[in-house]
Amino acid sequence: MNHIARKRFGQHFLADDSVIHAIVRAIAPRPGEAVVEIGPGLGALTYALRDRCGALTVIELDRDLAARLRRQAGLTVVEADVLKVDFNALAATAGQKLRVVGNLPYNISTPILFHLLDASSVVQDQHFMLQKEVVDRMAAAPGSKDYGRLSVMLQWRYRIESVLDVPPEAFDPPPRVDSAVVRMEPLPADDSVDAARLGALVAVAFSQRRKILRGTLGRWIEQQGLQTPFDLQRRAEEVPVDEYLALARARP
């Protein structure tokens, strides 16, 4: 298509047919489902998905690519910054839960993941191509070097699984990092946890991740006036997600 990848959009286009088909098999789309693709780019994954499900919605910021996509049958094109897209409204229009997929721009992948947290109740599942290091952090277990704020803030709302490793040569131009496809399945909503409060305490906990929590999260607990059996003689990376959730629910 003679399109030059634009660095400001973090564009790296999938070009390996075997990888594309492996991703589609992992997603397993069906006709009639509300599939939404973020960053369709040159359409390599887009057209493979359309062949399986008949139609899908695509979100593309690059106006040149959006114009080309509009000329293709079976695509509803939303030309917008994904961070400004209302996924709850998309689900309401579709009348069903969304299946969200995409090769996310690596430079803004974390903001996109956090933006989608607000729509987790209207999402059936998510399959994203991401930097492998990010996927490792998302799926990390307590006690591992990759376990951190991102792990906690996503695992309390999703079941997360790395499903496919993808080498740089599968892209054009190839990125300087390895990639991976992650599956994210929303867990039942937990109205007992305030997301902002959880986010605040987790940020404090991991602000000095190599230090014992008494000096960081301990001060936060004192400021909140909490009486809690939470063990502060640990590092942030040693605390399971459930314990952070319990602390977020605690009140004076």
Image: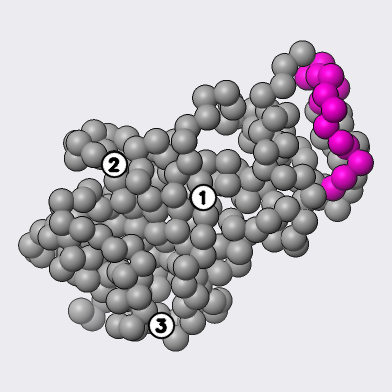
Viewer-nearest of discs 1 and 3: 1
Q: Which residue occupies 87% across, 45% down?
A: 234
Frontmost residue, 171 versus 10: 171
| Residue 83 shown left or right of residue 130 in the figure | left
Q: Residue most toward the top?
A: 252
Q: CA distance from mark 3 to mark 2?
A: 31 Å
In this figure, which residue is indicated by the disc labeled 3?
170
Q: Is residue 190 above or below residue 238?
A: above
Q: Is label 1 in contact with label 2 (beta carbons under 8 Å)?
A: no
Checking the image for residue 159, the label placed there is 1
Image coords of residue 121 (percent x, y): 39, 36
Residue 70 visible in the current orientation: no
* Magenta residues (range): 221-235
Q: Is residue 181 above or below residue 115?
A: below
In this figure, which residue is indicated by the disc labeled 2?
97
- Residue at disc 2, secondary structure: loop
